[in-house]
Amino acid sequence: MSEYVQDVSQGGVDWEQVKSLRVTRKIVDALNNLEVKSLYLTPANRRKDARKKYLGYGSRKMLSHAQTPFFFHENSEMVDLIGRDTQAFEKYQESCNRAVEEALSEDPVAVVQDDFGMQHQAIAIRVKGEVVGVIRCGDYISGKVDDLTVAKISENFLPYSIDQSEVTKAIRKLPFFTSEKVAVIQNLLQMLAGEIGVYLDEGTQNENSEENEKYNFEGLITKSPMILDIINQIKLIGASDSSVIIYGESGTGKELVANLIHKKSKRVDQPFVTINCAALTETILEAELFGYRKGAFTGAVADKKGLFEVADRGTVFLDEVGEMSLSLQVKILRLIQEGTFMRVGDTEMRKVNVRIISATHRDLRKFIELGKFREDLYYRLAVVELTLPPLRDRTEDIPILISHFLDHFGHKTSKRGIKLSQEVIKIFEEYYWPGNIRELRNEVERIVALKPGNSLVKSKDLSKKFFYETYPEGIQVGDENEEGFIKRLVDEFEKSLLSKYLRKHKWNKTKVARLCGITRQGLNKKISKYRLDRRRI
């Protein structure tokens, strides 16, 4: 008759509550019906005890320090016999310990055969990749029950001081499982560990959500002083109606910041409209921004409002404004100065009241020098300037961003408990992230798609790009066929190197100038050229 154990509360987990769950009891009943005689639990805190204290079965004095018979346990005559010989018992113990250790590897279920011919299966229970316990069953023979098998198993006991006649009787009382039955038991153990892991993970969701919420500023996940400073500026900027330009590499969150500014403004109840100026041709972009009259061009079968009209009294976000043609820049300038515009193909001047927030990854001052951007428009757009640092300059945010994205995609896919190993986190912190937060988000989404719940992500699970040789840190490669590519690449490298040295040497300009082989005056010119700001790097 199975003996149900009452006290298994260990390691901050209410195992008694786990034991009473309906779904886990169903799986346990199925295991019991398959003649699994015992189901053991090693709570995580017990695993940290002395290595020899994993099992203790057969030595009742050690049981409180060892694996606990969890759902059920039947006395095994065979294990009692082994317990009579110290050397034999140590061998048996080592096998059970090995099953527990192997359960912590990547194998879903560890299957270990001991020196006496008995098998043991074990599986780790994981919550967010962390082991909270190990379930083990065993003390069975894999194979058919016949005299030859019994005789072979009996030979394993010859080196020990155990009566052979008792050994033979005990062997025949052991459960003999076919390979098919062993596979079914493996599947049930996986289901049991998975259900327990999901239950325990759900219990930590509120705690994790509160931790993530601490660093969530209306969608900006950060504890970086640079971003926190920008958040404080957003609160002030929102109260005004000034134009704002946001600098930052692709994927740094420029649109999110623009939306936050809108939400903090008096225009919050009005539309927030976005458009990517680099994604459309000049004619299509003009039609989208200003609208058009019926018949203005082929396909214009009816009048259409442009985004400026749609956003009247609200905010328009012009992403990648540096890619806009000079002729279109003139029309944007007029709209900012006079609040008026004409639809494509129309002669009627229309009036709107919008706030313009723009963004770019370009150096607009350099574009002005090259004749690619109007200086008067620049000053109209850049009343307030914000610069978002790349992810590689705010590595302290990487762990909390990972946690946020794991929670987000884990909830969407019902895959809870996925956690990144410290090795992976280190790789992420050292990677240069050309796509910034967007790239990190995509990588985490990929991980969640390819990994099961309650699993630990290792380096082999990452995209191959993390192990390829790349451009130096901080360099935006762009299109190698673009005019002036080499010069821009050299400038990017110089800017990245200066930023690194200034940060490393705490803006000791004399020392940095000496390391770079230039004068202090020359360094100051480069700092001005690249708009390096001590508050930003």
Image: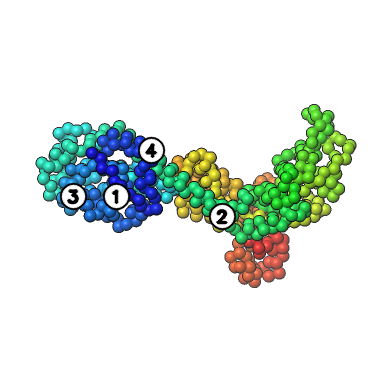
Labels 1 and 3: the sequence-earlier one: 1
Visible residue check, residue 381: yes
Q: Callout 1: 10 Å neighbours few (<14), some, many (20+)?
A: many
Question: Are the two marked residues, 2 and 4, in contact with CB atoms closer than 8 angstroms?
Answer: no
Query: Which corner quadrant of the image does residue 293 belong to?
Result: top right
Q: Callout 3: 10 Å neighbours few (<14), some, many (20+)?
A: many
Residue highlighted by disc 2:
214
Residue highlighted by disc 3:
83
Residue type of the residue flagged with mark 4? Arg
- Please tell me which residue is depicted at 17% across the width and 37% down the height of the picture: 172
Labels 2 and 1: the sequence-earlier one: 1
Mark 2 residue element: helix
Question: Are the two marked residues, 4 and 1, in contact with CB atoms closer than 8 angstroms?
Answer: no
Residue 270: image location, x then y, percent? 74, 44
Which of the pair 78/398 is nearer the observer?
Answer: 78
* Most distant residue in the right direction: 347
Q: Callout 2: 10 Å neighbours few (<14), some, many (20+)?
A: few
Q: CA distance from mark 2 to mark 3?
A: 54 Å
Nearer the viewer's eye, disc 2 or disc 4? 4
Q: Callout 4: 10 Å neighbours few (<14), some, many (20+)?
A: few
Which of the pair 162/427 is nearer the observer?
Answer: 162
Q: Which mark is residue 67?
A: 1
Q: Is residue 332 left or right of residue 130?
A: right
Q: Is residue 515 left or right of residue 87?
A: right
Residue 212: image location, x then y, percent? 54, 52
Labels 4 and 1: the sequence-earlier one: 4
Q: CA distance from mark 4 to mark 3?
A: 35 Å
- Please tell me which residue is depicted at 38% across the width and 49% down the height of the picture: 14
Q: CA distance from mark 2 to mark 4?
A: 35 Å
Labels 4 and 3: the sequence-earlier one: 4
Q: Which mark is residue 22?
A: 4
